[in-house]
Image (tube, rainbow, N blue to C red):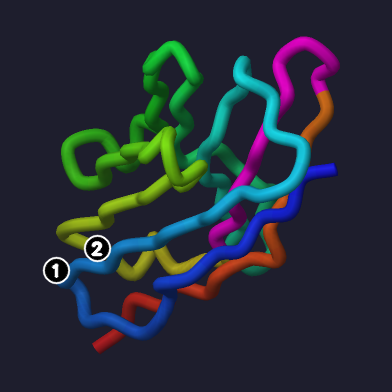
Amino acid sequence: QVQLVESGGGLVQPGGSLRLSCVASGSISSINTMGWYRQAPGKQRELVARMTSGRIINYADSVKGRFAISRDFAKNTVYLQMNSLKPEDTALYYCNFRTVVSGIDYWGKGSLVTVSS
């Protein structure tokens, strides 16, 4: 089992910045992917960004150039720096940990990001 604890969401004005953090604990396999997904009201959950333990990164097209994912492997922590936020970035952001060998997904409880003036 892997437990994920997120922090850093909140209310921000358009054009502002926020940083999300997620700490993983428990049975952490060395080969894994950590990342962020989001779900806006009435929409499906979608990938925002993810980074493998081999440091391969994927971003959704909608956030490229504005968001940056990073990991502190020693602390089992993943970060999402979100800049130039737009109202359409408003969503519940979920931290994800995937054990690559077994394909098991673990999810955080979600962190609400609201972009509004």
Q: Which of the pair 71/26 is nearer the observer?
A: 26
Task: Please say if 22 is above or below 114.
Answer: above
Task: Please say if 26 is above or below 60.
Answer: below
Apparent side of residue 102 relative to residue 50 in the rendered image (left or right): right
Residue 115 position, x and y percent, is 34, 76
Residue type, label 2: Leu
Whether pointer 1 and pointer 2 mark residues with C-beta atoms closer than 8 Å, the reply is yes
| Residue sitting at x 71%, y 66% | 109
Task: Please say if 5 is above or below 26.
Answer: below
| Residue sitting at x 74%, y 46% | 26
Query: How many callouts does the rendering have?
Result: 2
Per the rendered image, the range of residues in magenta is 93-103
Residue placed under numbered mark 1 in the picture: 15
Label 2: which secondary element: loop
Crowd class of label 1 (few under 14; some 14 to 19; many from 20; radius 10 Å): some
| Residue sitting at x 66%, y 48% | 45
Label 1: which secondary element: loop
Circle on res. 85: 2
Crowd class of label 2 (few under 14; some 14 to 19; many from 20; radius 10 Å): many
